Amino acid sequence: MSVSKTVSMDLPPIEKKSYFMPSIMIFSYSLAFAISIPAFPALTLTICNNDSSDSSYWYGIGMFIRYATETIAAPFVGTVADVAGRRAVLLMSYLSVGLETTIMALFPSIESLLLCRMMTGIGDSGISSAYTIFSDIATYNKDSLTIAFGQVGAVIITSFVFGPLV
């Protein structure tokens, strides 16, 4: 005769992780980007002594450098995020944005513009870590990934609304 006993264990509920801090980080990063979008052409025009053809040329070169660097750096930054941690990569992205803004404010020149665009490309490749952080939190909380990514999009769009106002 077999008697099966069931043991009931009252486990404490698992505390859910919050999306608040990653949302604040993404908002501030995107806000800095949204502020720089309308300021960058004017800054380029000022550096080029109000010569619109030179300004357009250097603006285009700067944008090319930024996106080419982001494309090249993204796989490496993703690997670093897997090894060193996503938070470290996201903080590196913030440091990059702060350093870029400081360099452009103190030393406005074509050389610093191109250097800063390269730094922005490397820093922006780290923003994918923010999506990964949201994905990790959603998986831990057993939430929908669609909702988590929707929250990231909502945070970024909100910063783009308030960026030009600042």
Image (spheres, rainbow, N blue to C red):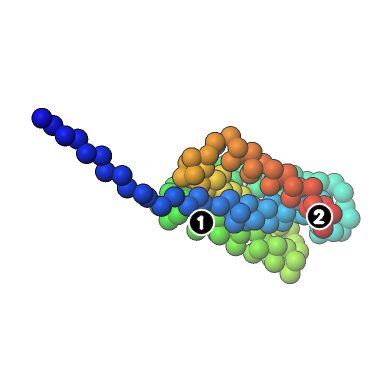
Residue 118 visible (yes or no) = no
Q: Is residue 125 left or right of residue 43?
A: left
Residue 129 in percent (x, y) is at 53, 48
Compute the Cα span from label 1 to label 2. 29 Å
Q: For the residue labelled by badge 1, is the local secondary structure a helix, a strand or a loop?
A: helix
Which quadrant is the C terminus positioned in? bottom right
Which residue shows up at 25% across the image and 39% down it? 6
Residue type indicated by callout 1: Arg
Q: Which mark is residue 87?
A: 1
Residue type indicated by callout 2: Ala
Which residue shows up at 49% across the image and 44% down it? 141
Residue 43 in percent (x, y) is at 81, 57
Q: Residue 152 sits in which quadrant?
A: top right
Which is nearer the eye, 76 or 150? 150
Look at mark 2 in the image and give the residue it sits on: 39
Q: For the residue labelled by badge 2, is the local secondary structure a helix, a strand or a loop?
A: helix
